[in-house]
Amino acid sequence: MNTSLLKSEDFIFSENTKRKVAIYARVSTIEQADEGYSIDEQVRILREWCDRYGYEVYKEYVDRGISGKNIHGRPALKQLISDSNNNEFDIVIVWKINRLSRDILDTLRVVKNFKENGITFKSYSENFETETHQGEMFFQMMAVLAEFERKQISENVKLGMIARAREGSWNGGQVLGYDTVEVSNENKKKKSTKLVINEKEAQTVRRIFQLYLEGNGYKSIANTVNHEGHRSKKNNHFSINAIRTILTNPIYAGYIRYNVRRDWSQKRRNNINPSPVIERGNHTPILSEDTWNKAKAILEKRTGKPNRVHSGEYPLTGLLKCPACGAGMVLGRTTNKNKDGTKRVLEYYVCGAWKNKGTAACNSNSIRVDYADKYVLNKIAHFTNTDELIKDVVERINNGDKDQMAPVQKEYQIVIKSLEGITSKKDKVLGLFEDGVLSKGELVNRLAKINDEKQVLEDRLKPLEMQLNQSNQVEISVKVVKEVMTNFEKVYKETITTEQKKHLLQLLISKITIKDRKKIDTIQIQLNNHVVNRFTIKGEEKSSEDDFSSPFSIYFNI
């Protein structure tokens, strides 16, 4: 018998030699709705495959309702990659290669990472694995096809939406002042939507335009409407950017605007389309043509490059946290007049929420730039050069501060339970859609709200996990902390540009809190793999007792 022709599936491993398999499954909201892909079905098929060939399922990694455009925003895939770096399993299997990613570069990078860790990648449907040269070649061909398929789908969707816009139809999404309502269309299989005025929100839109025509600027308008109790579509305070977006949106005058940015599959911050689709819409306008034209004329008159101050010149922006609301502090300026008539400009770090949304969101809670910058640098230097302080911090870190961890653990459990509830909510909504109770439009809207809620919880979870992980860390030595702080101070002094100085501070500092009386309270230092590797000597000179091969994060206040 020629054993060289046998595949790995032809062997049934004993209990002691069972290979561990990681199952990865993904489905996007649209695929679930349109194509009938099912996470549970993918997992069931892959589990059966593992049972059939005597493999042990190490873990199921599942991303529900998430696009395969790239690997960003996919927690399960990120966890899969992290576990593969620790060699937790031998094989990764997916139902189809496009479940991993529809982007060829992402796919190749991830599979290359698996290969470097000695892990085989296998696709169930395409029937290949990367252990053989033939399988690796076939995998690369399928990756190219998967990306081609994604681009074709993207282009077809784009063309369809442009056609709808030219007909004056709304392409979906939420907009203040209108509700999206589904309408039956006998000539089409799928239901279409139309915009219907939400009168309560329309009053907010009219008020914003009224204030603008009266000569108010964006911040003044945001401050006024926030104080008057007006709220955004998601029931938030209005920001300066939100006001500008409303004032420049022709939808309120009865027009549909589409394809403003030309990069369909990329981040569309830049590359403005000089000739977007602007057509008379099928919806009822909120504003008169006269009001819209007057606002447009004011906007064109005021348009120009703002006298912007780059935040790179002010290294603590974002690191300083507002003592009232916790928002990052940004630069603010006031101009005072001296007795001799000359003007003096004073610079402050002020609450970002206040600067962007006005006093309805928060107060300025300002702190002088010259005081804050000098205080932080002096505090770091004092800590670096005081061995007793470093020793005390290291002892507290290594002892775990167990009493302080109790409330953190409690909050962590609450967030985890809430995240589990999110999964149940998603399953319930998908079930309602499958039963015909919810339309596709309602499904997309509900899932968008659930994903927003999930993002908030995940943002809360990350710092909690980092704090809890400290109690399970390997002990850190006084020598390492001393070396990190000393080298940081040296590199900072040798750095020339303000942007680089800001980057160094943000690398070492997690956050800075302020007392009520405009004085700095605590400076939270963060030590992790990246920081230690950046500010310690690598190789043989590093102490063998300090093992930082595993990911870790440590925080302490100075």
Image (tube, helix red, strand yellow):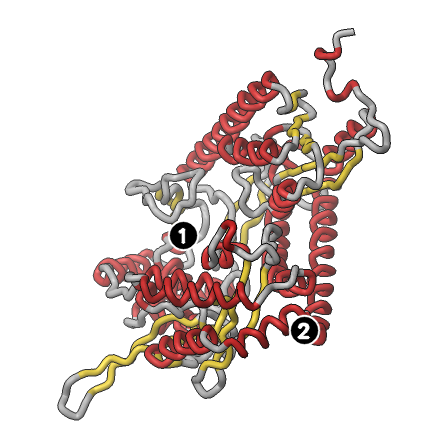
Left or right? Give the position of 390 relative to 339.
right
- Residue lying furthest right in this view? 15
Q: Nearer the viewer, residue 82 or 385?
A: 385
Q: Nearer the viewer, mark 2 or mark 1?
A: 2
Give neighbour class at mark 2: few <14, some 14-19, many 20+ (Cα, 10 Å). few
Which residue shows up at 42% across the image and 62% down it? 242
Q: Nearer the viewer, residue 542 or 447?
A: 542
The residue identified by callout 1 is 251
In this rendering, the answer to whether 283 lies above or below 54 is below
Residue 44 placed where, x, y %?
Answer: 78, 33
Which residue shows up at 32% across the image and 42% down it? 273
In this rendering, the answer to whether 343 lies above or below 4 is below
The residue identified by callout 2 is 401
Q: Secondary structure at mark 2?
A: loop
Q: Quadrant of residue 436?
A: top right
In this rendering, the answer to whether 494 lies above or below 227 is above
- Residue lying furthest left in this view? 340
Left or right? Give the position of 434 relative to 483.
right
Choose the circle earlier in sequence order: 2 or 1: 1
